[in-house]
Amino acid sequence: MKTKQLLLALAMGLVSNLSGNASEIVAATLILEAGGEYALGSMEAVNEVIRNRAAKRKLTPRQVCLQRKQFSCWNSGRIDQLLAKAKAHPRFIEAMAIVTGAPTNYTGGADHYHADYCNPYWASSLKKTCIIGKHIFYK
């Protein structure tokens, strides 16, 4: 994005100054995507998808989280507001512990997922690995 376009987008609130360190952005993604679920491994599974995509795409986990149209929770572009909302969530400390802790493998290597109430175009082209809570995971 060119400097003039970025400044205009910042002024309009469409993007932010991208505050928040990498762990906070990933933890916020876990909260915003699965913080309301209490199925065993629900937030860990989202973290696995982020880590797997980062490795596959040679990006940082933060870059993966904030990629355009990758995680619906960030689609508004209001990163600072969403980060503040996630930090206020009662499970944010748990999410940070997941992000900074040892890797898990609830999903069998998944790098995609969607909520069980939708059917994205790409789902039929991938192998389903598991269902955790209200999310279906694929690789």
Image (cartoon, rainbow, N blue to C red):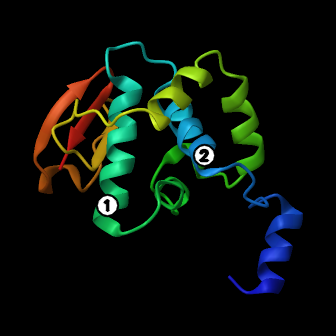
- Where is residue 3 drawn, in percent x and y? 79, 84
The residue nearer to you, when weighing 95 against 7, is: 95
Label 1, residues with CA under 10 Å away: few <14, some 14-19, many ≥20: some
Residue 107 found in image quarter: top left
Residue 18 found in image quarter: bottom right
* Element on which disc 1 rests: helix
Quarter of the image with the N terminus is: bottom right
Q: Is residue 124 above or below residue 4?
A: above
Type of amino acid under label 1:
Ala
Compute the Cα span from label 2 to label 1.
Answer: 17 Å
Residue at the (53%, 55%) spot, across then down: 62
Type of amino acid under label 2:
Ile
According to the image, label 1 marks what residue? 55
Residue at the (56%, 43%) spot, across then down: 73
The residue nearer to you, when weighing 97 against 86, is: 97
* Element on which disc 2 rests: helix
Answer left or right for 23 relative to 77: left
- Where is residue 126 drawn, in percent x and y? 14, 53
Residue at the (76%, 35%) spot, across then down: 84
Residue 102 found in image quarter: top left
Q: Is residue 43 above or below residue 11?
A: above
Label 2, residues with CA under 10 Å away: few <14, some 14-19, many ≥20: many
Q: Who comes first in sequence, dot 2 or dot 1?
A: 2
According to the image, label 2 marks what residue? 25
Q: Which mark is residue 100?
A: none
Answer left or right for 112 relative to 77: left
